[in-house]
Image (cartoon, grey):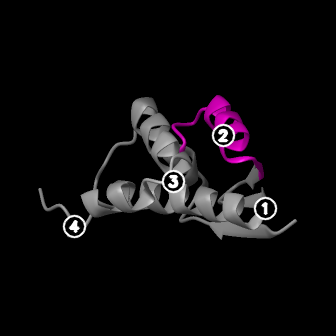
Amino acid sequence: MPKKTLHFQNPRYLNQLYCGREDNLALLEKTLDVQIVTREDWLTLEGADEAVERAESLFDLLQEGRNQGLSIKNADFLHMLNGVANGHYEEFRSLFEPAVVI
């Protein structure tokens, strides 16, 4: 099974992406059929190619939102997870392009 390790700025930043809720990671594993291991400022995704790509896409979206100042709430995480799981990655991606200036 393919593995991909994603690295983040620091442990707190990674924690904020999934709202600090381990149950969100468990739901991500179940929904996208991947296994996740996280330590400090990295996480490893393992599963089928498509599953790993979708999980990586989810974290890309969450990072893009966070980098633009979005304070990710649990509802945001769940909505993006469901969107990626249902093939709506590009629609969510378009929400962050061009960058939102506040």
Q: Which mark is residue 31?
A: 2
**Is disc 1 placed on a helix, strand or loop?**
loop
In primary-sequence order, the first of circles 3 and 1 is 3
Q: Quadrant of the C terminus?
A: bottom left
In the image, 25 versus 8, the foreground residue is: 25
The stretch in magenta equals: 18-36
**Cα distance between the residues tagged 3 and 1:** 26 Å
**Cα distance between the residues tagged 3 and 4:** 20 Å
Q: Residue furthest front?
A: 87
Q: What's under tag 1, amino acid-wise?
A: Ala
Among the 4 quarters of the image, the one containing residue 49: bottom right
Residue drawn at x 76%, y 50% is 36
Packing grade of label 2 (10 A; few <14, some 14-19, many >=20) is: some
Q: What's under tag 4, amino acid-wise?
A: Ala
Packing grade of label 4 (10 A; few <14, some 14-19, many >=20) is: few
Work out whether 16 lies above or below 43.
above
In primary-sequence order, the first of circles 2 and 3 is 3
Q: What's under tag 2, amino acid-wise?
A: Thr
Residue drawn at x 40%, y 38% is 76
In primary-sequence order, the first of circles 1 and 2 is 2
Nearest-to-viewer mark from 4 and 2: 2
Work out whether 68 lies above or below 18.
below
Residue drawn at x 65%, y 59% is 41
Q: Quadrant of the N terminus?
A: bottom right
